[in-house]
Amino acid sequence: MSEIDTECLAYEKDGKLIVPWRVDDKTVINLLTVDDFNSLADGTKVISIFGKIKEKGVDEIDLDTRFGRIAFGLLAEKRRIEAKHEERNKND
């Protein structure tokens, strides 16, 4: 039996489903919904499930979905840092 990649298990945070995807040995992204993508500022860099980096508003990005997610995401660590920052702002 193969090991389960626990870093890439979907989980819920603040009522929202987070879906991680392992791009390679060092990179995990959280896949975006179309709404998530549309809420990003132009110039935001996103990473495809194949590891290609594209820039919103500059590069052509396919918004085709599978199970409610596009094939692009943000670095998982960046998302965790942003969530921690939001929590700190709520407590201030």
Image (cartoon, grey):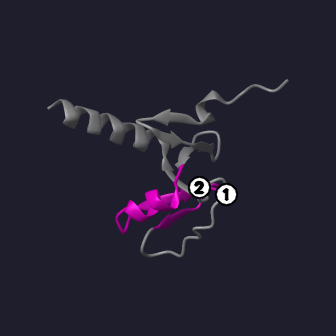
SS class, disc 2: loop
Res 66 label: 1
Residue at the spot x=28%, y=37% of the render? 85
- Judging from the image, what secondary structure is the residue with disc 1 in? loop
Q: Position of residue 5 (x, y in %)?
A: 67, 30
Q: Position of residue 90 (x, y in %)?
A: 21, 35
Q: Quadrant of residue 82?
A: top left
Name the residue located 44 percent from the left edge and 61 percent from the top edge: 45
Between the residue at mark 2 and the residue at mark 1, the CA separation in whole angstroms equals: 5 Å
Q: Amino acid at mark 1?
A: Arg
In the rendered image, the vertical position of residue 70 relative to residue 84, given as above or below? below
Task: Please tell me in which quadrant of the rendered image residue 86 appears.
Answer: top left
Q: Residue at x 35, y 38 (%)?
A: 83
Q: Is residue 2 above or below residue 57?
A: above
Give the image location of residue 78, x and y in percent. Answer: 41, 43
Contact flag, marks 2 and 1 (Cβ < 8 Å): yes
Which residues make up the magenta segment? 31-55
Answer whether residue 38 is magenta in the image. Answer: yes
Instruction: Determine which of the numbered discs, if any, sits on residue 69 in the image.
Output: 2
Quadrant showing the C terminus? top left
